[in-house]
Image: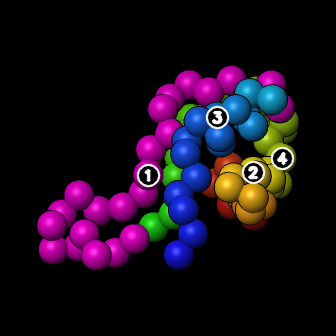
């Protein structure tokens, strides 16, 4: 299992693309003890609607000598 990527790395990449972040990054998952074993790597953050077109399809983050590609989505129906 790979190391989790800190939110600061993702935030930095979004800011590099001049995307204004309107909320903290939150992790998808369950806050119920019986479901704590279910793990999700999905995260979400709110951005300005005007910045949707600036959102790249993916970002590349280098962490501990490993490249991680993170795919971004705006939750619109494709």
Which quarter of the rendered picture does the C terminus lie within? bottom right
Q: CA distance from mark 1 to mark 2?
A: 18 Å
Marks 2 and 3, Cα distance to the nearest angstrom? 11 Å
- Examine the structure image and report whether residue 31 is included in the region drawn in magenta: yes
Q: Which residue is mark 1?
A: 27
Mark 4 element type: loop
Which mark is drawn over residue 5? none
Q: Are marks 1 and 2 in contact (CB under 8 Å)?
A: no
**5 in magenta:** no
Nearer to us in this view, 30 or 59:
59
**Residue 18 shown left or right of residue 22 in the figure:** right
Taking the spot 42% from the left edge, 57% from the top edge, the residue there is 28
What's the CA distance linking mark 2 and mark 4?
13 Å
Q: Are marks 2 and 3 in contact (CB under 8 Å)?
A: no
SS for dot 3: helix
Residue 51 at x, y = what percent? 76, 30
Q: Position of residue 53 (x, y in %)?
A: 84, 38
* Residue where numbered disc 2 is placed: 61
Would you say residue 69 is visible in this rendering? no
* Distance in Å between CA atoms under marks 3 and 1: 14 Å
Whichever of labels 4 and 1 marks the residue nearer the N terminus, that label is: 1
Magenta range is 17-39
In the picture of the structure, the residue carrying the numbered disc 3 is: 11
Quadrant of the image occupied by residue 17: top right
Q: Main secondary structure of the magenta part?
A: loop
**Which residue was labeled with disc 4?**
56
């Amino acid at each position: 299992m790979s190391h989790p990527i800190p939110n600061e790395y993702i935030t930095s990449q979004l800011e590099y693309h001049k995307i204004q972040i309107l909320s903290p990054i939150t992790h998808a998952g369950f806050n119920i003890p019986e479901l704590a074993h279910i793990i999700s790597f999905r995260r979400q953050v709110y951005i300005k609607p005007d910045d949707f077109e600036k959102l790249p399809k993916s970002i590349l983050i280098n962490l501990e000598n490993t490249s991680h590609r993170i795919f971004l989505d705006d939750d619109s129906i494709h």
